[in-house]
Amino acid sequence: MATLLLIDSSVFPEGGSASRSVTAAFRTAWEEQHPDGTVIHRDLAADPLPHLDGVAASAGFSDPATHTPEQQAAFALRVELAEELERADAVVIAAPMYNFTIPSTLKAWLDQVIIMGRTAGETPSAKGTPVTVVASRGGSYAPGTPREPFEYVQNYLEAVLNGGMGLDVDFIVPELTMAPSNPAMAELVPLYETSREKALQEAATKAKALAENLTA
């Protein structure tokens, strides 16, 4: 059976979150193709992971046979997250832009799941797994816009997920999400609506295509 790993990180519920709306559309389309499949859903806002500390970090660079009880407990979580990633046939990650970068909860997931010699390194264990990142943002940081130099979400995640972990990364970018609630952006509402509809359509199309590839 096909397995989808879905990671949400928005602090807002689906009705008030652009990224959650898109990941939900992705999940719906995926499940239509794989009704008997498995969805592993990590909601990092509702159930945040601990930030990586010295105990968990040192456990990743030492022989498990030498781990202290504290290292064993900390490393068990890292192994659990790595196994979820390795089991997945596809991954969709919500990465809304907060203060020009990703939510700290998503960074915590990355720090925990990146294990050198396993999920990262010369032969990453999930290499080639398709990952769709929903990089929503309140304004626009597209090439040619005034805020292009402040785009640290896509650049960072491309480097980490693809360059560090060997994953096959693709992006969906709903932008101008603050336009409906910010009077100063009122004239941009039509562009926001176009971006939102495009993102929802891309999510459904990508999910369907990935699902169909697994059964081809």
Image (spheres, rainbow, N blue to C red):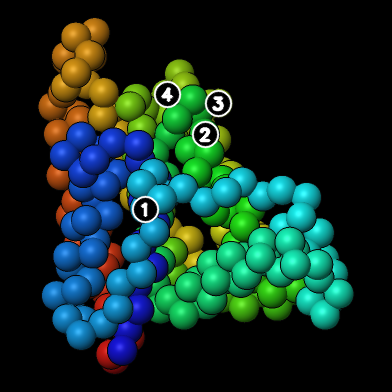
Q: Nearer the viewer, residue 158 or 32?
A: 32
Q: Secondary structure at mark 1?
A: strand
For residue 112, which numbered disc appears in the image?
A: none
The relative height of residue 53 versus residue 142 in the rendered view (above or below) is: below
Disc marking residue 149: 3
Q: Is residue 64 above or below residue 198?
A: below
Q: Which mark is residue 43?
A: 1
Q: Compute the Cα span from label 3 to label 2.
A: 12 Å
Residue at position x 24%, y 40% from top? 13
Q: Earlier in the sequence, mark 2 or mark 1?
A: 1
Which residue matches tag 4? 145
Quadrant where the N terminus sits is bottom left
Q: Nearer the viewer, residue 5 or 66?
A: 66
Whether label 3 touches label 2, CB < 8 Å:
no
Q: Is residue 91 left or right of residue 193?
A: right
Mark 4–mark 1 distance (CA, rounded to whole Å): 32 Å
Measure the C-alpha gap from mark 3 to mark 1.
30 Å
User: Looking at the image, is mark 3 or mark 4 nearer the viewer?
Assistant: 3
The mark lying in front, picked from 3 and 2, is 2
